[in-house]
């Protein structure tokens, strides 16, 4: 019988959660069902998802950041179709394929013209974590050192090397021993210097804006870190897997501080959301130390990294980002969104601040002063530290069909990571919905608190509070 994927999907729609519950990740299924996120999306276009009844959802999560251009961008779809029609030789391995060369050329030109003139070499990967893994390995190989420094709250991926640079115990616990290293508190330049002085540190790995907690390391901190790393022979790895390629309003997030890291990791956006891809952009001197002679030309390599579909999507994505001036757009709309949140939030006592860069924003809440609300706040936090954010995220989805997430352990933070192609109307829609949800959360007793307490009870009873917290905080 001929294989007919369309028909297969058509006949099996609706079995999504059952299949995942049985074969993939039953804990995730439980979490999604508990918070009312167990939708069956049938199609997507740009920044919108559509369910079985054709209800429209505004996606402020963008697949953890891969859909900077939204879903199913016509130019990206055309690129994939064109590539398939060309019947190109793909992954010959013992050749040098043109698409990878072209994408490398473009990435280097972008890096050099956006503040990093010394970046001149590319290594392609299949994911963000693989880019960070590779960068750490290159740094160890080039410096002949084995320790890494990373920031509190850092998230660099979940394979063992990247996990070693993770600043959240919740992710690390249960998986040791990891690579030797040391966590540095945000802005603690003295601690950084103490570690660097030991002259055994291969790399300082950092996110120019942290995906967990949405903290932005200050320019003085990063500049001083750069100076100290140079002084003590440590390489700087900027993890721009989430923040890079326009998300923060600049092509590269390190442009905000003006520092020049030795290695830059990118991924997510580069894929156009269609074909996984990542890259390490780095200096030739590091390449020469790692790939030091002909016999070592594949001392670090992978099978799929330079595959034609990924390279084609990368080229098309960069073209669209440039042509549609997407980084500039992210800057303008991000500022509107942040300023709008800050203005409306100021009216509510649990709202602390809206922070971030471009369209990578976090909204933090803090303990209220009024007695009634404080009692409710304390109760919820006693139930589960990751629960409060759900008082915002759950009704945003349930009442307004907006997809968001909580992000950051032990802080009450809702994260916004929308596609960079959102419109002013989307921003207005979000702000109106957000205000309603925040206003509701300030009424105690009230339905918002009932829902969240019920959620707390369910997670406690189901003994899945950790899973809820972890999944909801996953990036
Ligand atoms: N680095 C950062 C900053 C990320 O945000 C992520 C994922 O969210 C990663 C690395 C890991 O990327 P991937 O999920 O593609 O492995």
Image (cartoon, rainbow, N blue to C red):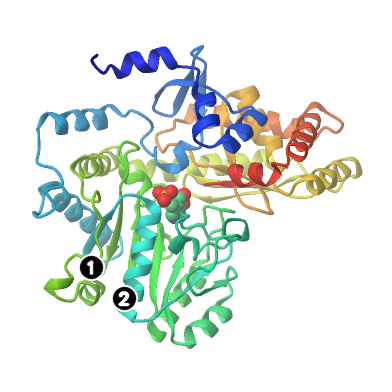
Q: Residue 299 carries which label?
A: 1
The response on whether ligand 1 sits within 8 Å of label 2 is no
**Image side of residue 197 versus residue 448, left or right:** left
For the residue labelled by badge 1, is the local secondary structure a helix, a strand or a loop?
loop
Farthest residue to the right: give it.
371
Label 1 with label 2: CB-CB less than 8 Å:
yes
**Image side of residue 324 versus residue 146, left or right:** left
Q: Of residues 287 and 186, which is closer to you in this image?
A: 287
Say few, some or many: other residues with alpha carbon within 10 Å of mark 2 (under 14 / 14 to 19 / 20 or more).
Answer: some
Q: Which residue is under mark 2?
A: 141
Q: Which residue is drawn at 88% across and 44% down?
A: 375
- Residue 372 is situated, as x and y percent measured from the top left of the image, at 90, 40
As drawn, 21 above or below 175: above
For the residue labelled by badge 2, is the local secondary structure a helix, a strand or a loop?
helix
Mark 1 and mark 2: Cα distance apart in space: 11 Å
- Residue 318 is situated, as x and y percent measured from the top left of the image, at 26, 44
Farthest residue to the front: give it.
1
Of circles 1 and 2, which is in front? 1
Q: Of residues 217 and 3, which is closer to you in this image?
A: 3
- Residue 189 is situated, as x and y percent measured from the top left of the image, at 55, 77
Please report whichever mark, 1 or 2, sits nearer to the chain's N-terminal start: 2
Q: Of residues 65 and 468, which is closer to you in this image?
A: 468
Q: Which residue is drawn at 43% across and 29% down?
A: 47
Q: Which residue is drawn at 9% across and 33% down?
A: 87
Residue 389 showing in the rendered view: yes
As drawn, 435 above or below 399: below
- Residue 398 is situated, as x and y percent measured from the top left of the image, at 64, 24
Q: Residue at x 31, y 63 (%)?
A: 115
**Image side of residue 157 versus residue 465, left or right:** left
């Amino acid at each position: 019988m001929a294989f007919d994927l369309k028909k297969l999907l058509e006949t099996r729609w609706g079995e999504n959660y059952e299949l995942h519950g049985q074969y993939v990740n039953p804990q995730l299924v439980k979490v999604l069902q508990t918070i009312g996120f167990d939708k069956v999306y049938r199609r997507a276009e740009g920044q919108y998802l559509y369910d079985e009844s054709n209800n429209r959802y505004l996606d402020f999560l963008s697949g953890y950041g891969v859909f900077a251009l939204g879903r199913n961008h016509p130019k990206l779809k055309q690129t994939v179709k064109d590539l398939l029609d060309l019947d190109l030789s793909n992954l010959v391995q013992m050749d040098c394929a043109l698409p990878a060369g072209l994408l490398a050329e473009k990435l280097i030109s972008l890096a050099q013209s956006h503040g990093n003139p010394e970046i001149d070499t590319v290594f392609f990967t299949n994911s963000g974590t693989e880019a960070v893994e590779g960068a750490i390995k290159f740094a160890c190989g080039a410096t002949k050192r084995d320790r890494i420094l990373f920031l509190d709250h850092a998230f660099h991926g979940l394979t063992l090397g990247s996990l070693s640079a993770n600043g959240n115990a919740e992710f690390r616990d249960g998986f040791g021993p990891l690579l030797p290293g040391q966590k540095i508190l945000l802005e603690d330049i003295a601690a950084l210097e103490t570690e660097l002085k030991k002259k055994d540190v291969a790399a300082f790995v950092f996110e120019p804006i942290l995906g967990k907690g949405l903290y932005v390391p200050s320019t003085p901190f990063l500049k001083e870190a750069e100076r100290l790393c140079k002084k003590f022979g440590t390489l700087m790895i900027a993890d721009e897997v989430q923040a890079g390629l326009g998300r923060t309003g600049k092509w590269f997030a390190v442009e905000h501080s003006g520092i020049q890291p030795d290695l830059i990791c990118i991924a997510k956006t580069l894929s156009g959301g269609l074909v996984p891809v990542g890259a390490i952009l780095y200096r030739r001197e590091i390449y020469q130390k790692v790939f030091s002679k002909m016999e070592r030309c594949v001392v670090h390599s992978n099978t799929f990294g330079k595959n034609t579909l990924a390279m084609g999507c990368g080229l098309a994505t960069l073209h669209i980002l440039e042509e549609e001036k997407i980084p500039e757009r992210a800057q303008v709309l991000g500022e509107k969104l942040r300023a709008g949140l800050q203005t409306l939030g100021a009216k509510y006592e649990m709202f602390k601040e809206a922070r971030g860069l471009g369209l990578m924003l976090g909204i933090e809440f803090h303990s209220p002063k009024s007695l009634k609300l404080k009692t409710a706040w304390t109760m919820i936090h006693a139930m589960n530290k990751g629960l409060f954010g759900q008082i915002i995220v759950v009704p945003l989805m349930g009442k307004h069909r907006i997809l968001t997430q909580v992000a950051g352990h032990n802080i009450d933070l809702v994260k916004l990571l929308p596609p960079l192609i959102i419109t002013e109307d989307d921003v207005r829609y979000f702000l109106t919905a957000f205000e309603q949800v925040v206003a509701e959360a300030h009424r105690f007793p009230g339905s918002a608190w009932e829902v969240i307490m019920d959620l707390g009870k369910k997670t406690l009873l189901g003994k899945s509070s950790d899973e809820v917290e972890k999944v909801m905080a996953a990036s």
